[in-house]
Amino acid sequence: MSSELWGPRELSRLRVIEALVRLPGSNRTQVGQEAGLSRPTVVGVLDELERAGMIEQWSEPETEDRPRPTGRPPIQIRLAPRAAFAVGLDFGHRHIRAAVCDLSGQPVADDWSEAAVDSEPDASLDLALALVRGVLERAAADPADVIGVGMGLAAPVDAATGEAYVEGILPGWGGLRPAAEMEARLGMPVRLDNDANVGALGEHTLGAARGARDIAYVRLSAGIGLGLILGGEPYRGRLGIAGELGHVRTVASGGALCRCGNRGCLETVASAAAVADSLGVQVPRVVELVSAGDPEALAAVAAAGEAVGDAVAALVNVLNPELVVIGGELAGAGEVLLEPVRRAIAAGAIRPSSGAVETRVGALGERAEVLGAASMVLAGAPRLLAQRLGGA
């Protein structure tokens, strides 16, 4: 049902559910104030939600510090976490990860597998289907209660059309519509976005950037991606492909050939893959070598951090964010990576912007993207639940 066709009853349901999302564990009076609705309207909607199994209610217990007031104790209300679920999918270049989150946003089950994503799209999509079925089974989640699937892909994605720009990035995916292919396999609605964008959303919702309004999430993996949250909302640009930090040219002339066709792009010198290649090892081995104090690995990661910091300094000058979060596989190097990033920002960004920004490692690690993909779906949960309630 389009929101333009909703009547007063449907809109009241939506406003009550939105209030419960913003104020979990509130009472009826607080829900009414937050929703801007009369008490009879709120009570009626809450009764509907209770009959549909969408809310949990309880009386606040009496404690020594807070004795129970006289009269009837206020009833606390929240959306039942298992009333609905969202699925997240993260398609990296070399892996696929799936997770299921409950309505509160907490992960209930997740799993991953290595995969030749770049060159084997059909096999990768089939593997994603198997992973989703597995995590739903382990979570004891009924597929009918899944409100949608968020899918992060290591390629620019047009937010309006859902088209992925895969040329030079995912060579085997030309001509495919990833979201439609995944929908056909799952029988569930799928929303597609770039992996760095969903990583930013994951850290903003559940991780290191909670409460921040202006953040830049830099993903250092096989490539280098940038996800932006500005004014508390995701920023994707006109076509949905803002944030291609990895293709900022850092070498004035020449440099290694990048998959985008240019030379000297940042990701040719500072991505996890570039650092691993310079050391003659696989990407997971880089962090192991750093942890062991290997001099060559320490120097290579520090040089990558400096290059990333130079690029981020320009970003700080342009956007003046409060927080830079470093994620992706190379983030496991910790302070060996972060200190050069911070120094380069301090040297290259103007004051007071350089002093106002904080740089830290993401809190969600390898799960940032998959949890962010699920969070992308949960952001639309109030409307979807209101629609479900209206159709009950």
Image (cartoon, grey):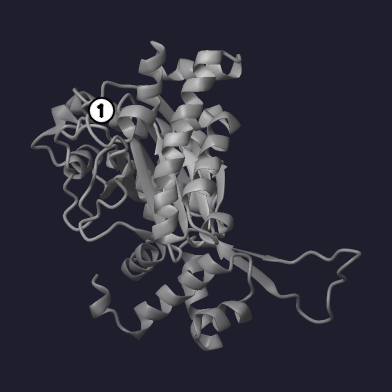
Q: Quadrant of residue 282?
A: top left
Q: Is residue 359 shown above or below 322? A: above
Residue 156 in the image, given as x and y percentages of width and height: 24, 44
Q: Please state if 141 lies on the left or on the right of 298 as rendered.
A: left
Q: Is residue 61 visible?
A: yes
Q: Is residue 263 shown above or below 187? A: above
**Could you tell me which residue is drawn at 26 percent across and 32 percent down?**
264
Most foreground residue, 127 or 168 = 168
Residue 34 in the image, given as x and y percentages of width and height: 54, 79
Residue 29 in the image, given as x and y percentages of width and height: 62, 81
Residue at the farthest left position = 175
Label 1 Cα crowd, 10 Å radius (few <14 / some 14-19 / many 20+): some
**How many labels, in total?**
1
Q: Quadrant of the C terminus?
A: bottom left
Q: Which residue has dot 1 on it?
A: 255
Q: Quadrant of residue 270?
A: top left
Q: Is residue 15 shown above or below 53? A: below
